Image (spheres, rainbow, N blue to C red):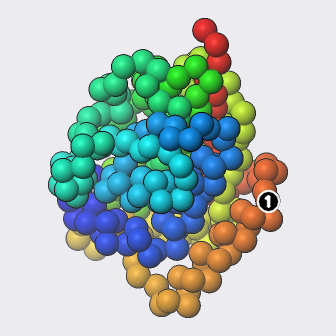
Amino acid sequence: MRTTEFKRMADHETAHWWYRAQRANLVDAVRSLPLAPGARVLDAGCGTGRNLVELQRTLNVTTHGIDASAEAAASWNGDGRRCRASVNELPYAGESFSVVASVDLLQEASVKPARAIREMARVLRVGGFLVVLAPAYQWMLSRHDVAVDSVRRFTRRQLHDLALRAGLTVQRSTHRFATLFPLVASARMLGKLGGTNGGAVRSDLRSYPRWVNGTLHAIARTEHRIAGQHTIPFGSTILMIARKGAA
């Protein structure tokens, strides 16, 4: 990811409605799993580590993270449970973690999705869980994706196939942000129109008035609470939970 875009992401990820809702999606997914106290959780593509902070704060787990970005590594302040590495080749022994999470990572240009999922499965303990949050629908690929070095989006079937080929069993698959999907999809479609006016391509990240930001976050979280464990058939993000069975 470009340095300017990484900085914009870091500046927005604490308060921006979408990041807050996505973190809550991750925490809720991990909370739903039958984990022993202190279970080891790896965030593959942890960025600044903000998701790990939230997991550690709200759940009784031990968190670790990897990211290939130099900008991400510079924000870790010497935290020994973070390391700079590629998800395509995880620097851990097999069966090291009870949970591996992948949040908005598989779409990045540097990631090889099939290889990355195999690596995540390799470092999972038998009975462990893979939690994936990934962008939906290739037709929504826009200038925003280009700006953050994303080259692909997924269908649920594509994610299922990646998990199955890695020897995992899909336990849950659903969409997220269905209520706000028309708004998000419209923004992406507008992002396909016109040029860049001679300037650099930029992401859609921006600050909103507090009431707008709060309202959007409340809508996303209310949808999630109402939906519960039901499958949502459409939305801008896909949540998949898969499990590693006995060899």
Q: Quadrant of residue 106?
A: top left
Residue 34: horizontal and vertical position, in percent? 67, 38
Q: Position of residue 243 (x, y in %)?
A: 64, 28
Instruction: Locate the C terminus by quadrant.
Output: top right
Note whether 201 is above or below 161 in the view shown. Answer: below
**Label 1 secondary element:** helix
Where is residue 199? Give x, y as percent: 23, 70
Q: Which residue is mark 1?
A: 227
Q: Residue at x 53, y 82 (%)?
A: 213
Q: Is residue 129 left or right of residue 97?
A: right
Q: Is residue 239 left or right of residue 74?
A: right
Residue 121 seen from this side: no
Task: Characterize the local packing of mark 1: few (<14), some (14-19) or many (20 or more) Cα atoms within 10 angstroms.
Answer: few
Q: Foreground residue, 151 or 17?
A: 17
Work out which residue is located at the far front of the displayed protein and give it: 37
For the point 75% across and 64% down, the residue is: 225
Q: Nearer the viewer, residue 92 or 151?
A: 92
Q: Quadrant of residue 7?
A: bottom left
Q: Position of residue 76 (x, y in %)?
A: 24, 54
Q: Nearer the viewer, residue 181 or 25?
A: 25
Is residue 173 found left or right of 210 in the rendered image? right
* Residue 244 higher or lower than 220, as above or below: above
Above or below — where is 196 with respect to 243? below
Q: Amino acid at mark 1?
A: Ala
Say which of 2 and 171 sits in front: 171
